[in-house]
Image: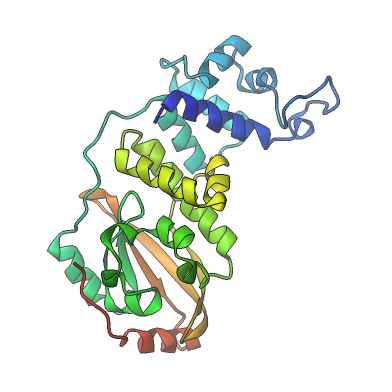
C-alpha cells in the first residue's frame, strides 16, 4: 500500500463530508470545485499553514507531530477510530509478521465450551475458529475452502450468505470499515491487499464502500439475521480481544433470556457440523 496516497485520500474524504456553513464558512464564497471544505479552510480550522496542510495531505510531511494530527482530527470531527486511523496513516508501522492462519488449541477449546454461537476472527476478517452453534447460525465453515472462510468474501461473493441479512447495506459497510482499519494498522500485509484487490474486481458494492474510507472498530451491537430454519432473529454480539494476540478477536452472539431467539439458538446449537480443519 502506498500510505501517502491512502493518507491523502482519507483526508480528502473527511473534508468532503463537512459542509462549509457548518464550519463557519459561507458556502457561496467563491466557486467550489469539490464538496466540503477547501484545504485552506481546513488548515485555518486546524491552526496550521496552508502549505503545511497541503504537504500533509500529499504525504510529504512524515515528521508531523501528534499535536498537529490531533488538531486536524478535531477540525475534521473524527471519531476515535478515525483519529487512530489518521495517526497510523501519517506514521505507518513497519512491516509485521502476517496474521496467523491457525489458532491455539486452547482457543478452540474455549469456543467449544461456550454455549452460544462464537467465532475467532483474524486481522483480515478470516474466520479462524468456530463452534457448533456458530455453524448452525451462519454456515458450516469447515465445508468451505479455507480462503472462503472470510467475512468480507462471504458477504460479497456468497449470495446465499449475504441474503440472510436484512440490514445488508449497514452490515457490509461495517465489515469493509473493519478491513479498512486493519489496512491502516498493517499497511504491508500483502494478503490483506490481495483480498481487497480480488473483491474490488468482483463486486461494485465493495469498490463503493472501500472508496468511502470509512473505518470501524468492532466492539458490540445488534445483528439481525433471517435464518432459513429459525426465521427472523435479533441477536446481541460482544467482541473481546486476546491480550497475547491482538490480531485475534472473539465474537459471541447471544439472545435475551426467555426470548424466542434464545430458544432458537438452543435448537440451532444441535445442528450437525464439521470440526475446524
Q: Which quadrant holds the C terminus?
A: bottom left
Q: Is residue 45 positioned above or below 159 on the image?
A: above
Q: Nearer the viewer, residue 236 or 212?
A: 212
> Residue, x 55% and y 12% (percent of image)?
52
Question: Colour scheme of this structure image?
Answer: rainbow
Q: Is residue 105 positioned above or below 48 on the image?
A: below
> Residue, x 70% and y 27% (percent of image)?
37
> Residue, x 45% and y 17% (percent of image)?
64
Q: How many labels were placed on the picture? A: 0
> Residue, x 49% and y 41% (percent of image)?
80
Q: Nearer the viewer, residue 234 or 44?
A: 234
Q: Is residue 79 positioned above or below 95 on the image?
A: below
Q: Position of residue 213 (x, y in %)?
A: 54, 40
Inspect this view and state whether residue 190 appears: yes
* Corner quadrant of residue 191: top left
Q: Which quadrant holds the N terminus?
A: top left
Q: Residue furthest right?
A: 28
Q: Position of residue 151 (x, y in %)?
A: 40, 59
> Going by the image, does 218 lie left or right of 75?
left
Q: Is residue 251 positioned above or below 224 on the image?
A: above
Q: Position of residue 274 (x, y in %)?
A: 23, 77
> Going by the image, does 124 lie left or right of 4?
left
Q: Nearer the viewer, residue 56 or 198?
A: 198
* Corner quadrant of residue 113: bottom left
Inspect this view and state whether residue 116 appears: no
> Going by the image, does 99 lie left or right of 166?
left
Q: Residue furthest front?
A: 202
Amino acid at each position: 500500500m502506498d500510505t501517502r496516497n491512502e493518507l491523502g485520500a482519507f483526508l480528502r474524504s473527511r473534508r468532503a463530508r463537512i459542509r462549509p456553513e457548518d464550519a463557519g464558512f459561507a458556502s457561496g464564497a467563491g466557486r467550489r470545485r469539490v464538496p466540503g471544505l477547501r484545504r485552506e479552510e481546513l488548515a485555518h480550522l486546524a491552526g496550521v499553514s496552508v502549505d503545511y496542510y497541503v504537504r500533509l495531505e500529499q504525504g510529504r510531511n512524515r515528521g508531523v507531530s501528534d499535536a498537529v494530527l490531533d488538531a486536524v482530527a478535531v477540525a475534521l470531527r473524527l471519531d476515535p477510530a478515525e483519529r487512530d486511523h489518521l495517526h497510523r496513516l501519517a506514521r505507518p508501522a513497519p512491516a509485521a509478521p502476517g496474521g496467523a492462519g491457525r489458532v491455539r488449541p486452547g482457543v478452540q477449546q474455549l469456543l467449544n465450551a461456550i454455549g452460544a454461537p462464537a467465532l475467532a476472527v483474524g486481522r483480515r476478517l478470516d474466520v479462524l475458529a468456530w463452534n457448533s452453534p456458530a455453524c448452525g447460525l451462519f454456515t458450516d465453515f469447515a465445508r468451505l475452502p479455507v480462503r472462503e472462510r472470510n467475512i468480507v468474501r462471504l458477504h460479497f461473493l456468497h449470495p446465499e450468505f449475504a441474503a440472510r441479512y436484512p440490514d445488508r447495506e449497514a452490515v457490509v459497510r461495517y465489515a469493509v470499515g473493519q478491513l479498512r482499519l486493519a489496512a491502516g494498522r498493517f499497511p504491508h500485509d500483502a494478503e490483506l491487499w490481495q483480498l481487497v484487490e480480488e473483491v474490488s474486481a468482483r463486486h461494485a458494492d465493495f469498490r463503493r464502500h472501500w472508496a468511502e474510507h470509512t473505518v470501524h472498530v468492532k466492539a458490540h451491537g445488534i445483528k439481525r439475521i433471517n435464518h432459513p430454519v429459525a426465521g427472523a432473529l435479533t441477536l446481541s454480539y460482544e467482541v473481546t480481544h486476546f491480550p497475547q494476540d491482538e490480531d485475534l478477536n472473539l465474537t459471541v452472539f447471544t439472545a435475551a433470556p426467555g426470548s424466542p431467539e434464545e430458544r432458537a439458538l438452543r435448537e440451532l446449537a444441535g445442528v450437525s457440523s464439521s470440526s475446524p480443519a
